[in-house]
Amino acid sequence: MNFGKKLPIITMIGLLLFVTLAMAPVNGNPQTSALPAIRTTEPPREETVWMTGSYNSPTQFLPWSTSLPPGADAGMYEALFGYNSVTETVVPCIGTSYSWGVTGENLTIELNTHAKWSDGSVLDADDVVYSYELAQKQARYSTDFTARFADFVKVDADTVRFDMNPGYEFSRQVEIWIMYNIPIVPQHVWTLIETAHGVSGDLTTYQYDWFDIANVPNAWKVISGPYAPVYRDALESTCAYQYREDWWGAGILYQDLPNAAAAPPKYIGTIRFAQNTEQDLAFIQGNVDLYAGYFHHIWEVWENAFPGTPGDYISCWYGHDYPYQLAASALMNLAPNHVLPNSPLGVREFREALAYAINYVPIPDAAASGYWTQAKPGFIDNNSALHAPYYDPTVTAEYEKSLNVAKAVSILESIPLMVHESDGTWTYDGTPVGPSTTPYTAICPIGWTDAIAFTNFVTEDITNNLNITIETLLVDYEAFYKGAIEDSTYDFAMFVGGNRLADAPGRFLDFMRGEHLWNKNVTAWENATFETLWQTLETANEVDYAANLDEMQEILAREVPEIPGFVNGYWYAFSEYLWKGWASEANKFQQLVTSWTDDHFVIKTRLMLNLKSTGAAPPGAAIPWFGLEIFIMVGIVSAVVITGYRLKTKRE
């Protein structure tokens, strides 16, 4: 056979095969049946909704975690229901309906017969009963679950019944759990995980990291939600999730969404930036779609943008209208450690005195572009539609704080064991209080520019006005801040991680009581009356409910467990350059949720599924690859090969 004459043909075929293989997507092996393949590179920009602003690291995907990375609670997991507070309707998901018994002694839930797990198995009553039994073993829920639930019962394959303990009939808290908090997990997987990693069923220390094959084998990667993790970078700061084409809810759930008929984003992802300046730039340039952080003077972005550029497409909850951001998030407070040894931080009068040493007036404009409003002393606030009916203005009139140094000094001098020394310093039981040589510190996460400004203002005011030195200490959020609060090893902390004013009053005030965690009851405050009132909120009639909230507001105002600062903005800015369909005041198909909104599995998932591509090219995108280039390249190379062959033949 004369291979010389056929060399050009062989070369072209080989080159075509090489180029075709080279263009194939760079993906790893599929993780398990019906799950998208793990990627080794970021997904294409034009197919991905990128979010930023949440500081939760994508290193664990434990369903009940209070530190779930965005995407895990907006796609991986599903709850029984959601609640749309705009339409005031329950949103079906794994559950289709629920009803209380005649006397509220039990709650019966009908399940969606279409629900399936990603491995193809049926999601049924066994999974729901097991999920609630397992949730009860988790530290986050164990105390409150045990108090309320007598039993979780499988009625049939598509029906469950939750039996209540006496005193918890018609529990508002139970309704919150079924609509917000508790994800449903596959019994056939989590029984294995519980056996391998649970401590009496508690999995708090287990990471469930999908990218750690040693601790999460492929068989354990089973979910019911529409998005599965497929990519994480080496720095563990970027994570992406891919839409599951065989998701059971497609065409069944959420058909009320404005864009229900459109294809959802193929990928959703989150990026953590080290500094606000980095994420600001990424947002302005169109490399981020949902910005859930403080943005200084955000209106200047679109005012200064050239028409048609990404910055021209940026908007907020209130669009381009003042106040841009909705002030209905968590309170930004100064939290003293009540159990700090040999200190007066656990003394009510001491905390009250510090509150009178702060000049609140200049802080909102200087720290937050005017987005903030001063927090009410009783925490319940009338700028929340859900709080307004229960807000007690008499509490504010009596207890609201403003700068009054003389009053602060007078309160300090009234505290037993507190001595105002001749040099202007203070001692408590013989121990110096915030001396300049060994000052108190107030921890605040690095890069949180608005929170840093707030912390600097209040600590400098207290230092200058009372001669009690507090210095701002900037720390890493994951490596230090959360652990210091959890372990009560801090002096003061800027705290803005509680529940939001956008939540109902009972749910909102939950962050001030119960178990001490890094984001709940952070000061380790205890007040038996407050706890009793909170416990009775969920079953009280409307008159008693309002009366209890009045008393709870007065307790908070009087006891000052945290020094109230400001109502933080519910940071939510978005770009319509690549994706449209964002919820807003003008497109109010549901309430505001953002990437760091805790739980709300159903509502967060709906937000992602409603997004629709605009078809615009990504900023700075390369020239599209259409396939014709293959043949052009083959033709060029073939011409070179043929010319070389002919020259060689001619010489011979």
Image (cartoon, rainbow, N blue to C red):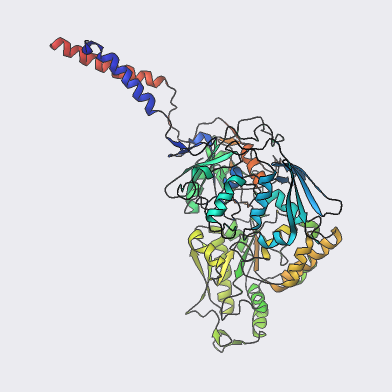
Q: Does residue 445 appear left or right of residue 182 in this picture?
A: left
Q: Residue at x 60, y 87 (%)?
A: 419
- Is residue 58 visible in the rendered structure shown here? yes
Residue 258: quadrant of the picture: top right
The residue nearer to you, when weighing 274 against 157, is: 157
Quadrant position of residue 332: bottom right
Residue sitting at x 81%, y 61%: 166
Taking depth in this image into account, of 24 and 383 the one nearest to the observer is 24
Give the residue drawn at x 43%, y 26%.
625
User: Quadrant of the image for the C terminus?
Assistant: top left
Is 492 on the left or on the right of 438, as rendered?
right
Quarter of the figure with residue 157: top right
The answer to whether 230 appears left or right of 571 in the picture is left
Callout count: 0
Q: Position of residue 315 (x, y in %)?
A: 61, 43
Q: Is residue 203 above or below residue 592?
A: below
Q: Position of residue 113 (x, y in %)?
A: 71, 36
Residue 434 point in image, percent of width and height: 54, 79
Q: Is residue 459 above or below residue 418?
A: above
Q: Quadrant of the N terminus?
A: top left
